[in-house]
Image: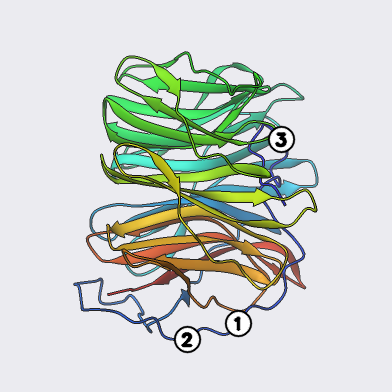
Amino acid sequence: MRRSLFVGSVFALAITGASAAPPVRAVASPGASPRTPSLTCSGGFVADTTPNPKKIDILNAAKAFAGSTVWAVGSTAIDASTSVPLAERWNGSSWSSVAVPPFGSVNNQLSGVAGSSSNDVWAVGDEDSAGNPGGLIEHWNGSAWAASTGSGAGSGFGGVAAITSTNAWAVGSFGLQTFVEHWNGASWSVVASPNGPGGDGYLAAVSAVSASNIWAVGATSTSALIEHWNGTKWSVHSSPAITGTSFLSSVREISASDVWAVGAVESASFVETTLVEHWNGATWTIVASPNGSSSFSDLTAVAPISATDVWAVGNQSSGALAMRYNGTVWTLVPELAGHLTLNGATASTTEHVVWAVGSQEKSSKPFKTFAEHVCPA
């Protein structure tokens, strides 16, 4: 199932119909790193206890900061027609829900989160005020979240990157066109961005190597889309030819010559397989990646710890999907069992922990928030 980030329902990112996945097994680790003492590390993924304010709660993205702070954002449904933004924070020992003010009167969802520090955090998504959708931007100043909007009805944001407190980028779509805004420390403003060859496109994620080296990924109606900011303008960057309908959901940088993007490819027979692309400083290339045991496998997020330890998560027909790159090859990592959907991931390079977030289906609750972590080394 293609995970579209064009403006839509608060539940557009949820993938349903999952069933039990293989039980967790140990993940080989080359060494030890200092971590928060209360963090459970079993060698494989460990499920966390997360708050669930309402009956339908979903986490879409996560960001780890130096130390033990992790933010996860998404949405929670008040009733059948109204949802509000959701933010949850890991403080080193537990997850707690932190109030986020809604902007629109009907639907609010957050799809991306980033920050220059744990006291300067941006979360982006979209809101719908009585059928008048627009981009949603929230900011955490260390003590409270405050809401604002993007520039104009019809927009919606999929991802955000923050370089400094006066330099942040939000990407998404405006109707069926790419859409980009920039924060200069005082206000957000629209920055021109190109569309794909067919004249359409959306941007799902953005990652900054530096102020003049920023990557954004997404898709057109038929193929993956990669764009680059060189400090002056955004331009479409050449990407590998792919047979089938492809899209990229996530991008993360390690260095100027080491950037990863992940997503999926759908064939003419509607078989969906994982897609991994890598930038080596000169060209983007497709890197072989494994798939789950079904006709549906996609990747929703990539989270690098180092050049030789990169993680990616996503979904398959039987549940959650995870894989790891060791500097040479990608291999599947056993996931937790249950009706899980993984939408986002982040890596703490200081504590050497990978976090993944999403939702879980329960018989008593259609969707509840879900978070898990693994301690690779």
Label 3: which residue?
8
- Residue 139 visible (yes or no): no
- Number of the front mark, 2 or 3: 2
Q: Amino acid at mark 1?
A: Pro
Q: Quadrant of residue 146?
A: top left
Label 3: element kind: loop
Number of the label disc, if any, that sits on residue 22: 1
| Mark 1 crowd level (few <14, some 14–19, many ≥20, 10 Å Cα) | some
Q: Position of residue 87 (x, y in %)?
A: 49, 49
Q: Residue at image x 38%, y 36%?
A: 161
How far apart are the two marked residues, 1 and 3, measured between alpha carbons?
A: 32 Å
Up-down: is 225 above or below 356?
above
Report whether 366 appears left or right of 90: right
Q: Earlier in the sequence, mark 1 or mark 3?
A: 3
> Mark 2 and mark 3: span between their CA atoms?
37 Å
- Looking at the rendered structure, the kind of residue marked 3 is Gly
| Crowdedness near tag 2: few (<14), some (14–19) or many (≥20) residues, C-alpha within 10 Å | some
Is 339 situated left or right of 280 in this image? right
Residue drawn at (37%, 82%) of the image: 43
Q: Residue 4, relative to residue 51: is it above or below?
A: above
| Disc 2 target residue | 25
